[in-house]
Amino acid sequence: MVHLQTWCIALAYYAATCPAAFVKPPSLVSKSVPLDLSSYLNNKAFGTFAGEAAFDPLNQSYPAPIVGHNGSYVSTQSGIIYNFPGYTGRHKPDNVLCTGQTIQVPEGNYFSASILVASDVELETVSGDLIFTHKDNTTSISELRSEPWFAFLTINRGEIILPYRYTTNGTNFNTTHIYEYSYALPSDKQLASITLPKTTNTTTGRLHVFAISLWQGSEVSVQSIRSTQKWLGNGTQVVEVTVNNAGTDCVSGKGLDIKLSGGNVTTIVPGHVKRLCPGDQKRVNVGVTGKSMGAVAVTLDDGSLQQIQSFNGVDLGLSAWTSDLDNLAQHEAPDWYDSAKFGIFIHWGPYSVPGWGNSTPHESYAEWFWWYTTHHPEADASDFYNYRLRTFGPEWNYDDGFVNYTASNFDPKAWVDLFAEAGAKYFVFTTKHHDGFANFDTGLTSNRSSLHYGSKRDLLGELFDAAAKHQPSLRRGTYFSLPEWFNPDFGPYGFSQLATNSSTSWPGMLARNPYTGFNEPYTGHVPVDDFITDVMVPQMEILAYNYSTDIIWCDCGAANGTADFAAAWWNKARTQNREVTMNSRCGLAHTADFDTPEYATFSTVQARKWESNQGMDPYSYGYNRATEPSAYMNASTIVRDLVDMVSKNGNFLLDVGPRADGTIVQEEQDNLRAAGKWINAHAEAIFNTTYWFITPEDPTGNIRFTQTNDAFYILSLRQPANETLVVDAPVPIMPGDVVTTVGIKNNTSLRWWKTKTGALKIHVPHNATSAEEYCWAFKVEYRA
């Protein structure tokens, strides 16, 4: 194993002090190496008034940031220090628009590269290859990817959040963002230069780099410590410690214990790293009590020798939640959510009565039936308009379908049993979609609900009760649309997402029957003074307190009352020792615990927690009767998508769309059960795991990786050929470790060896490959 010596490292940016006898020589201090990009700056992002800067093709810009005003910025998540330009004055550029520039770096061995970046077209995620050229003229390639610098409904959250943006002639109070991405660099090579992607298309979006910093070290050391507001019980706070191995030997054997001390801080639950090989990084939780706003010492202990690093200005201690945005921004997804990995989404409402979204290639979300048929011809490629006319006639109004939303075959126990059989660890039920119809008891806020119309049942209550009784390990979540399309009380807050005729919109006025020209009823509407204070927030409180949801899964957050709601809910949950979470669509970037891309995955690890949501239907969440049985997502795709997402720090929220009577399409049931057989048999390689810092997949794209503290998992999406699995990646395996298959009965140890090039080969007998389908999983158990 790697051997440690006793020392105290005073990192420059924390200005910590410690006895001179224990100071590690400066040449060995781990540190950030910010690059000087001043000669490459070619774009101006920050302004102090509209029109001063032109960050994007529309001559819009960020406001001048309050961070980095001294030319330096320390990441709140990674602890990396950047040379961050901030506002540089009029006419002076402050970022690098990526056009393929090659940036020379101080020669040396570097552990990782971190970048502050943003793309500049709304709704467009932009990516391109970063090329790292080494001193021996070899190259490494990694994806530089960024979400757009703003998204209208605030569904993204960056490392740096700014409160608004300048348009060409005014101010738009939609948050803007700068994102952070980090990449592992080859530990055995010296870096010479970095070549940026070439992204110059103003329609599809361009990448802008604000800062680049390299991490340099020579041994095992702590990169950062981060105070969280998570807890382990009895007031024990979770502190995240990021540990890097920039040395040449693996941490193995007894591994490392990690403790914090300083002031009145006491470590109650030490962190532990059992295996950490060169080039790798782990984020480790340490449980502490006490408070500190001063120096905190981090001790790495291998049982015989110690290493001590001191960090200054660390604010430790659990605090009450307030509506202050900086306070709310400290909330994050709880560990149970990160470990759960796989959830089931359910879209069920009156839109299941028409159940129409057309078929590929002209398929749309079936749950948007009412909106499309109020007639939006520019957006209606799936021809909802004519389907409604020929199916229901011109006099039919959307609310006339309530009587057919019967739930007559709804069996909540069968549902939750299916979810568990599929291998899911949580579910999210659509309590109210944009049509304003609620599947729960909305109290005095509205009578537009399943208690008053259709089934006249509390559908949410029945489902939650069934889960609590029959599948108590399933976490329970609630989808909730903040706006309602046609609720007239939403009028003062009505909006269109884009300035085009085809834009989705929440107009806040009664829908008009497209054939008769008369207003359609808004059945069950209770007039109120203010939609946010009298409907939106009270209904969120009902879900939080009356139904004790674990997840508030918002959608379409524009105008909102989220800040006060979140603070109150999180405080209440803490008194109950419950860790709850909110997604990224509640209207405030600061309350976004995890991001929620739709029908998407990524090619690289996302350090920020994310969850991809998509339907088993190829392009609909609600039930679509036009979908052919063979078109539903099959078991193989479910397993492969889950494995891929988990390897990149993602969760998979997979949707089913029941019919109006509560039956789930048989093909969806069958495919979920088939996938569940694999998922449940291979649970240890999926649940309670984390991603691998070095890479989520091998160069062929056929192998993914996950890990726990005690083992490393290799998941092959292709059957090993010729009884041999070849893994061309620096797997953290050592002589003495044991390799076995996962999910196959009567597992035996498999023979393995390393090639001269460092690739891992595993002998996989025919009986092991033939006994498996979908994905072949292997466990490297740390025994060395």
Image (spheres, grey):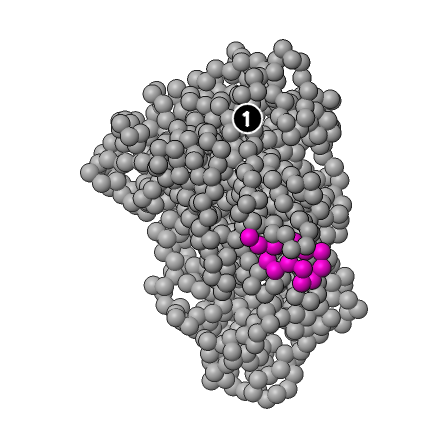
In the displayed structure, 359 sits above or below 635; it is below
Residue farthest to the right, as pictured: 529
In the rendering, at what x and y percent does residue 197 appear? 44, 50
320 with respect to 417 (left or right): right
Determine whether 438 is above or below 337 in the image. below
- Asked whether residue 51 is drawn in magenta, I would say yes
- Res 597 visible: no
On the image, the x and y values in percent for residue 270 come to 59, 23
Kindly indicate the quadrant of the structure image that contains residue 473. top right
Q: Is residue 461 shown above or below 24? A: below
Of all residues, the one furthest to the bottom in this rendering is: 516
- The spot of residue 297 in percent (x, y) is 65, 22
- At 40% from the left and 39% from the top, the residue drawn is 133
Name the image quarter holding the N terminus.
top left
Quarter location, residue 13: top right
At 47% across and 58% down in the image, what residue appears?
Answer: 200
Task: Name the one closer to the observer, 658 or 309.
Answer: 309
Residue 238, above or below 589: above
Q: Amino acid at mark 1?
A: Ser
Q: Nearer the viewer, residue 276 or 676?
A: 276
Q: Residue at x 69, y 67 (%)?
A: 169
- Residue carrying label 1: 30
> Can you give x and y, in whole percent of width and height, for residue 420 in the image?
47, 47
**What is the span of residues highlighted in magenta in the rendered image?**
42-55
